Amino acid sequence: MADLSNIREHMEVIGADGVHVGTVDKVEGDRIKLTKADSGEGAHEGHHHYLSGGLVAEVEGDTVRLSATAANALQFEEEESGDAADE
């Protein structure tokens, strides 16, 4: 796993294939919290999603590159649980 301390707000998250996965809201523990704007459509819309820090291959400039393709990374995405307060 890459060093998550180098990940900052508003960095772009891309898959190993170079496809946009999301934008960093912040790092919480060993997970990356993505902005609501990247939450998807339908039931996924309007709340934060999380990616495991274990998917991070490298952090370079303003980009977080994952070890999985964008499509595969989205399968591992976790949704915000319960009635968490909006930030």
Image: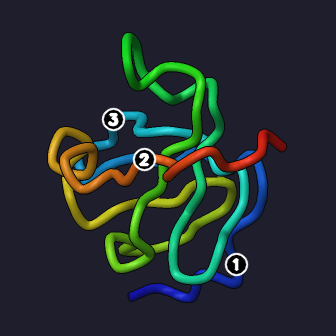
Quadrant (top left/top right/bottom left/bottom right) for the N terminus: bottom left
Residue 62 coordinates in the image, percent (x, y): 68, 54
Residue 5 coordinates in the image, percent (x, y): 70, 84
3 or 2: mark nearer the eye: 2
Horizontal arrangement in the rendering, residue 66 relative to residue 22 (left or right): left
1 or 2: mark nearer the eye: 2
Q: Residue at x 21, y 59 (%)?
A: 68
Spatial CA distance of label 3 from label 2 is 20 Å
The reply to whether callout 3 and callout 2 are in contact (CB within 8 Å) is: no
Q: Tell me which amino acid carries mark 3.
A: Val
Q: Residue furthest top?
A: 42
Mark seen at residue 6: 1
Q: Residue at x 46, y 85 (%)?
A: 2
For residue 5, above or below residue 48: below
Q: Residues within 10 Å of mark 3 (few under 14, many from 20)?
A: few
Q: Tell me which amino acid carries mark 2.
A: Glu
The quarter holding residue 12 reads top right
Q: Residues within 10 Å of mark 2 (few under 14, many from 20)?
A: some
Q: Residues within 10 Å of mark 1 (few under 14, many from 20)?
A: few
What is the secondary structure assignment of the residue under circle 3?
loop
Q: Residue furthest right?
A: 87
Quadrant (top left/top right/bottom left/bottom right) for the C terminus: top right
Q: Residue at x 33, y 51 (%)?
A: 77
Mark seen at residue 73: none
The reply to whether callout 3 and callout 1 are in contact (CB within 8 Å) is: no
| Residue picked out by circle 3 | 19
Q: Tell me which amino acid carries mark 1.
A: Asn
Horizontal arrangement in the rendering, residue 70 relative to residue 65 (left or right): left
Mark seen at residue 79: 2
